[in-house]
Image: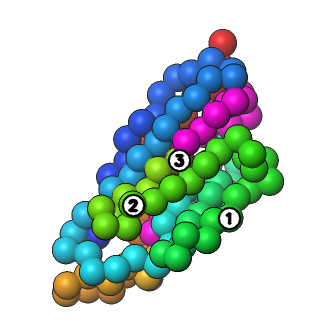
Amino acid sequence: QVQLVESGGGLVQPGGSLRLSCAAIGSILSINAMGWYRQAPGKQRELVALITSRGTTNYADSVQGRFTISRVSAKNTVYLQMNSLKPEDTAVYYCYADNVVGSAYVRKTAWGQGTQVTVSS
């Protein structure tokens, strides 16, 4: 089965930058879209950014122009470069993948365990 392994969260001051990484492992043949969601305390999980296998990207309005999503399909890895971070970006960030085809399985959706991003002075 597929497993999404995230890294790169942490504490950063307002205006700073962080880069999140997520690697999908598990005898993977193909993945459609990969991306990031986030969930702040007391709020619903929301889409941050998504990138398809063709490179089409989609961003939440709140991060447009500050965050950049990229993907290395050959490595089944997705990145999120976060610049000009604000306190309201504080949340647990979850890696996401859909339509994952493995050598012996198909998964409609897969989620990482989450990584904490805290923006505070």
Q: Is residue 48 left or right of residue 102?
A: right
**Residue 90 on image: x %, y %:** 64, 34
| Mark 2 vs mark 1: in front | 2
Q: Is residue 30 left or right of residue 45?
A: left
* Residue 46: mark in rendering: none
Quadrant placement of the N terminus: bottom left
**Residue 31 on image: x %, y %:** 40, 76
* Residue shown at the point (38%, 67%) measured from the top left: 73
* Residue shown at the point (61%, 49%) measured from the top left: 68
| Residue at mark 2 | 72
Q: Which residues are magenta?
A: 81-97
Q: Amino acid at mark 1?
A: Asn
Q: Secondary structure at mark 2?
A: strand
* Residue 80: mark in rendering: 3
**Residue 108 on image: x %, y %:** 44, 82
Circle nearer the N terminus (3, 2): 2
| Residue at mark 1 | 58
Circle 1 crowding by C-alpha within 10 Å: few under 14, some 14–19, many from 20: some
Q: Is residue 99 above or below residue 87?
A: below
Residues at circles 2 and 1 in contact by the CB criterion of under 8 Å: no
Q: Amino acid at mark 3?
A: Leu
Quadrant placement of the C terminus: top right
